Structure formats: C-alpha cells, structure tokens
Amino acid sequence: MEKKITLAHGSGGQAYRELVQEVFLPAFSNDILQPLTDSAVCNAGEKIAMTTDSYVIKPLFFPGGDIGRLCVSGTVNDLAVSGACPKYISVGMIIEAGFDMETLVRIVESIAMTAKEAGVCVVTGDTKVVEGGGVDGIYINTAGVGVFSDARPPLAQRIAVGDRIIISGYMASHGMAIMAARENMGFTPPIKSDVTPLAALADRVLQSGCVVNAMRDPTRGGVAAALCEWVTGDTDIVIYEDLLPVRPDVSAACEILGMDPLYIANEGIMLLSVPERFAHNVLAALHSENAGKNAVVIGEVKKGCGNVYAVTKYGTSRKIMMPRGVLLPRIC
Amino acid sequence: MQMRYRIEDIKKRINELAGGMEQITVMEVCGTHTANIHKYGIQELLPDNIRLVSGPGCPVCVTDHKDIAAALSLVDQENVVFACFGDMMRVPCGDRSLYSLYESGKDVRVVTSAMDALQIARDNPDRQTVYFGIGFETTAPQTAALIEAADECGIRNLSVLSAHKTMPQAIRQLLGNGSGIDALMCPGHVATIIGAEAFDFVADELKLPAAVAGFEAYDIMAALLCILNMLKNGELKCVNMYPRAVTRHGNKEALSLLYKVFEPCDAVWRGLGEIGGSGLGIKSQYKYFDAMHRFDIRPADIKEAAGCICASILCGKSMPTDCVNFGRGCTPDRPLGPCMVSAEGSCAAYYKL
Amino acid sequence: MCLAVPGTITQILDGYAQVDYGGVSKQASTRLFKDAKVGDRVLVHAGFIIQILDKDYGYELEKLIGETMGFTNADEV
C-alpha cells in the first residue's frame, strides 16, 4: 500500500479500489457493505430517523479521542436522542493529497471501533481527494439512519411544565479538551474529551418504561444553547448552578480561561426533560450504564415566557442567553 | 477557613445600614467586577436604594479607535503574526475587527499570556510577531516582562503595540466634583500590583469612601458592607477589604519591572477623551520593541457610530437603555460600540437582563 | 479586568513554576514574583504569578467585617 494519499485515490480508478479493499472493507466488514454496490440496501421498518454531520475538527487526534471516534459518536448521538435505535451510517471523506496513509488507517480503525461500540454498521461511503492545501488534512461527513418501532416511537421532543431537566454526565469536557489541545495550553494532565456514543445509554432509558418528553445532545453552544432551543413561549427553564456537574480539571481550566462551562461543547452527554414522577427511575436507568454514572437533575421547567435562568448558590438568578459567535478565552 | 459571617449576615447588615438612607450610587472600575456582579446577581442581594454602576474599568471598552485601527493595519501587513487576548478580537472599528481579519485568513492568534508571544516569535523567525498590549496595571507588568525577556534572549522579530493604561488618573477625572457617585469599589487585582495605598487619594483628595474589593461574591458584599458603614458614619477612608491578595505597597517587583520598560504618557480613552499621564509608553531604551516605532502605521480616521453614547455610559452617567442604538442597531451579535462588545461591557451585561 | 485564579506551586523551574489548580496544573511565569517557592499558594493572572496569597487572610477579613456588624466586643468573644 502506498504511504501517502494521492489524487489518484480519489479518482474512482485502480488506486481507489485498492484503498477500499485494503483499508475500508477490512475495517468496516459487514454484509451490507461487502457487495460494494452503488447504494446500501438495508432493512429499516416504516419510520426512520436520519441525520448528517460534517467533521472538520483540528487537531485530528486529541486526548480522549480523534476525528474517527467523533464522526461516529456525533451522528449516533443525534439519532439516539430522537428515540430511534441507531443502525446504519455512511462515511464520506474528503482527504488532502499527501495525507499520511498510516494516519488514515488509524482514523478508519477508530471509526470501526466506535461503530462496533455503538452497535451501528458502516454501510456505504465515499472518498474524494483534493489538492494539497484544499482541506486541512481530512474532512469527514457521516450520515446516519436509526429505526423506530411501535414499542419505540419517536419522542415528542416537547418539554412540559413540571418536567425535571436531567443531564447524563459532566459538562464542557470536549470543548475544553479541543481548545487546550489546539492552542497547546499545557495543562497537566491533558484535558480529555468526553466523546462517546450514547446509543446504549439512550436505550436503557427508553426501555425503562418511563416517559421522556425530550432528549438532546448539547454539542456546539453547550448546555446553554440546548436549553435555549428547548424553551417555548409559555415555559421557563430554571437550572441550579450548584447542581451542575463539571469535572474538577475542566472547572479549573474554565476559570483560568474565563469561560463559562454552560456554553462549551459536549460530545458524550445528553439532556433529558422528564415528567417529575419518572425522574427517579430515569436517573436509575442512566446510573446503570458507565456513560451515565454521573447523571443528575439540574433543573426544572416552569410556566413562563421563554427564558432560561440559572440560580446561583446565593439564591440570585441570571439569565442564560443563546451563545453568540465563537467563544474565546478572556483575561479580563 | 470557615468564615464566621455568612453572606446572608452581610446582606442583612447592608440592608440595616442602608435603611433610611437616600439613594446610594457605588461605582466599580473593573471589568471583572462588572462581570462577577452580574454572574452572582449581586444587585439582587442589595436593597433598592443601592445602585451599582460600571465605570471605565474594562480595558477592551476604553481602547481608543486609533489603537484598534493601528492593530488592524498591522494585521494587514505582509509577514506579520498578530497576537492578542481573546477579549480584543471582536471590538469593531468601522466594519472590521481583529476577528473579521482572522476569518478572512490573516494570521491573528489569540494568546492567554504575554509570554506566548515570545514563543510565537521563536517559532516564526522569518516573520514579525506583534503583541497587542492592553490592560491596566495588573497586565502591563507582564508586557514589560515580555519585552525584557525578548531583549535578554536577543529576539529581534517581536514588537509590542501598547495600549496599556493606568487607573488613578482616570478615576480622578471621572470622580471629580459633581460626579453623582457616592463611593468607589477599587479594583482588587490592580491593587495587588500598585498596593492599597495607591487608592488612598480617593478618600483624601476626592472625598469619597472607597474599598479595595476582591472578586468572589463574598468579597464584593464585604466591600459594599464596608462602604455602607463608612457612608452611614460619615467616615472617609480607603479600606483594604481584599487583604488576602492586596498589601499596602503592592507587588514592588512587578512595579519596578513595569517602570523599567514603560513610562507614563498621555492616552486617549474611548468615550472619555484624552487623560494626561494615564497611558504607558515604551521607554526610549526599549523603543526597538515598540511596534509604532518599527512599522509605518497610517492611523485611519474612524468615527463613533451615530447615536453611540458609550462615553456617557462608561462614566456611569447614562444607562444602556438610554441609548437609541441599544437592542436595535447595536446588539451583542453586531456591536457598534465598546460597551456592547466586551462580555463585561455595561451594555452587553445589561442586554442579558 | 483581572481574571486571576488561586493555585499552589508544586515545582519551580527556570523562570516558571508549575501551579496546581485542583485537578489540573499549568506553568506560570515567575518573572513578577521571583521569591515563589514550592507549597506557596499564589494568585495567577494571564500566566503570571502576581502575588502570594496570605494564609491568614480570613481572620483579617473577618475582623474588618466584624467591625461593621454592630456587635460589641463582648459578643465577638
């Protein structure tokens, strides 16, 4: 196999076929992908959830994960929080000519491992190669399909007055890990991303018999953006600052950089809005999985007019706004 | 240690002291105080007759157009790597900002410490690294340290664009007669460097009670309690209410380094105009490191947006809601003036309410 | 301005100290505070140590607050 990706690898000819046979097929091996037909033919029942995301992250490898783990987890999690059972994903790559083949293999292996962990198959894909300087190494798009059933219908995705807001784990780990890695901030030990597929965790909750009104994965914009998107014209969401779970190293890093954990990206947690009478059992379901062991209630939905508030430990409150622009560290 | 008085006790005592008093207006002159007062909801803990007002303590807000224009013109130059704190990235100057230039592909890098600029210069020996020095006495000594280090190491491809300012002269100008301010909450970390004694003049000359304050909710409430007590009893002092980090004389080492590299000069504060002796210019023996000296910078003539009353808001004379642009042409997404740009600018903080 | 964070020095290097912030540590310059020692609890602003934190500050602050609380000396004892 060649040591570097070349333009030929993206041209659909011999080099491309070798890449598929030697790198992609062995990693993703499954019956749907094997025939290498133009389209994957899959069983999916009557109602499906479908999502797509593109991954342009830098650096490609970071403490806690890499672009391969991220591109599977992100798409799986979008499906999982819809209530569907994630089943199939596609992997489309745009690679810079000159990209190191060994690095590509590492990324592909990470995709395969994460897909297995998430219980999904990579059923189709595409590879294009662009001239050097066209992309920053590699960009990946994944699309995913998840299935519903009578026993597992789509969630209402509407919060209701009286709901408890539950978070499944620690906040802000991914965003801080990426920023620290990209800017060589020199934290010791390095801050680790939380990137994790949550299919199994969502499954536990949805199999528990509890009613869940809404679920989200709070990625870019953090928990703040997710809550601001959830709130409706006749509700307010109130969260309690002393209940918000943040890892000590992430909390310290946020303080040093003057950033608010509520606004920082996550890739391994979800938010749930659950009627009060089911909150206890939903928490128990989350706690039964490793990915949910730090789940906790952080707030509630009240009657209101579309505001999100955080109550401080002094009993005062501040409004949480939709984040604007890119979050930057500050010294002032 | 477990403090004997809880924040509830302090809140109760403030309410007792304020009872029966006329409207009290306390100004703070530190962007981090503005930010933390909002973060902890301090105004909610206070009785209605105590009003907290933000003065020009946010270095982002008071950096003059000309300095930003100079920064932008440096970024425009071929071969320059421009390093600055994140706080400055989105300050608008005309229809551009450091961030807009970064988006268009120019090499603008956010740093979290002045010494990062030294490393950038080392890593890019064929290019000129320029560091944007903004901030008051807490941060200026760090720029001095950067210049001293560059000089010691023989780093020739680094220079500094200094927009540093010092607080006391601005406070004198703002809180002279008829300011309408009853007391000053003094910036705790500036005091860490220049010492609590540097704020004695607020009581001695300006005849206003003052307290040097820390930044946790407890510290801010303790400082307000001290101020209320002085106002009630007619006492005129500057009290150090942040003894864990502030000594009488400050950090002499930092001050000595600051004035080894910098000297006072006149400076223009956005919204306040020129304040004599309130700026920090690079001394002649270090002029090599002065970006204004090294580069040919053509200052552009940029005007404030029509209707912008940042000047008046920075002095605590107007509220954000008094401005015709507030929430209309001027929002956190598209800020027209400095008070909306900075996360701790009065208008940005107010917008969240 | 002046976002500054307390931390404890765990190591002194050349011109820098390793500062532990509880869960994570990072280097800070000692150029503005050359007397920094291992074990010192310090205040760090933008990557520079700017002051050592007084271990006994609590008592001093408590005394200052106590003076305004309207208690007599007898009550404080």
Image (spheres, coloured by chain):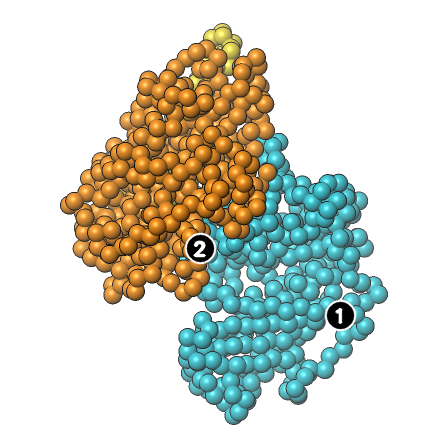
Percent coordinates x, y for residue C60 in the rendering: 41, 21
- Of residues C9 and A145, the one drawn nearer to the viewer in this rendering: A145
**Chain ID for cyan:** A
Three-letter code for the amino acid on which mark 1 is drawn? Ile
**Residue B242 appears in the rendering:** no
**Chain ID for orange:** B
Against B241, residue C14 (above or below) is below
Instruction: Please name the residue shown 70% across and 69% down the image.
Output: A50
**Chain ID for yellow:** C
- Of residues B26 and C76, the one drawn nearer to the viewer in this rendering: B26
Against A121, residue A222 (above or below) is above
Q: Which mark is residue B95?
A: 2
Percent coordinates x, y for residue C69 in the rendering: 51, 14
- Of residues A237 and A197, the one drawn nearer to the viewer in this rendering: A237
Instruction: Please name the residue shown 49% across and 8% down the image.
Output: C72
Alpha-carbon neighbours of circle 1 within 10 Å: few (<14), some, or many (≥20)? some
Q: Which mark is residue A324?
A: none
Instruction: Please name the residue shown 65% across and 49% down the image.
Output: A227
Q: Residue furthest left?
A: B285
Q: Quadrant of residue B207?
A: top left
- Of residues B11 and A180, the one drawn nearer to the viewer in this rendering: B11
Three-letter code for the amino acid on which mark 2 is drawn? Asp
Q: Name the residue beneath numbered marker 1.
A: A48
Left or right? Give the position of A315 relative to B55: right
